[in-house]
Image (spheres, rainbow, N blue to C red):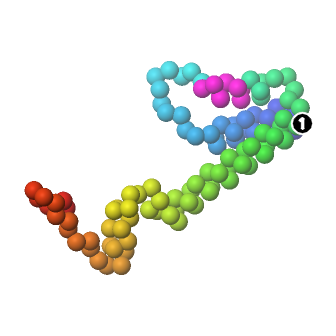
Amino acid sequence: MSNPSQLRSLYRSLLRELPPRPLAPSTARSPLHQRLRQSFSSDAPNGNAVAQAEQLVQYLKAQRQYSILLERYNPGMNMDDEERTRLSARRVGMNMPKQYVEGGEKA
């Protein structure tokens, strides 16, 4: 797979799977992007390095898909217990009772 167009495609696939970078006023590349660019711009990457890069792309795609599915099927995963309990009660058609604290209503 030493064809330049295939290497460029592999490089772009790797960049697509990396987490998005925040928009910054400077257009400087991150150290990871610089390292990837250097490794792909070398004269002739060996077959082993190309195979490892392809495997890395597959791994990153699987990790992204895993996190998407985890969020989809466990929507309360990142909520605190109180919020999760409130939403569970709403799911079965109930509302949680209002809690009162000294000095006023909590909500």
Q: Residue at x 72, y 49 (%)?
A: 59
Residue 5 appears in the picture as rendered = no
The relative height of residue 59 versus residue 39 in the rendered view (above or below) is: below
Instruction: Pick out the residue farthest to the left.
Output: 103
> Could you tell me what secondary structure mostly forms the magenta stretch?
helix
Q: Which residue is mark 1?
A: 47
**Residue range (magenta):** 30-37
Q: What residue is drawn where x is 20% and y is 65%?
A: 99
Total tally of numbered discs in the picture: 1
**Amino acid of disc 1:** Gly
- Mark yes or no: residue 24 visible: yes
Residue 2 occupies quadrant: top right
Q: Position of residue 97 (x, y in %)?
A: 22, 72
Indicate left or right for 4 with 83 as reference: right
Q: Is residue 32 magenta?
A: yes
Tell me the residue at 54%/22% (across/down). 27
Name the residue nearer the viewer: 100 or 61.
100
Quarter placement of the C terminus: bottom left
Q: Nearer the viewer, residue 102 or 105?
A: 102
x and y, in percent, of residue 101 in the image: 16, 60
Corner quadrant of residue 6: top right
Please name whichever residue, 2 or 19, is drawn nearer the observer in this view of the structure.
19
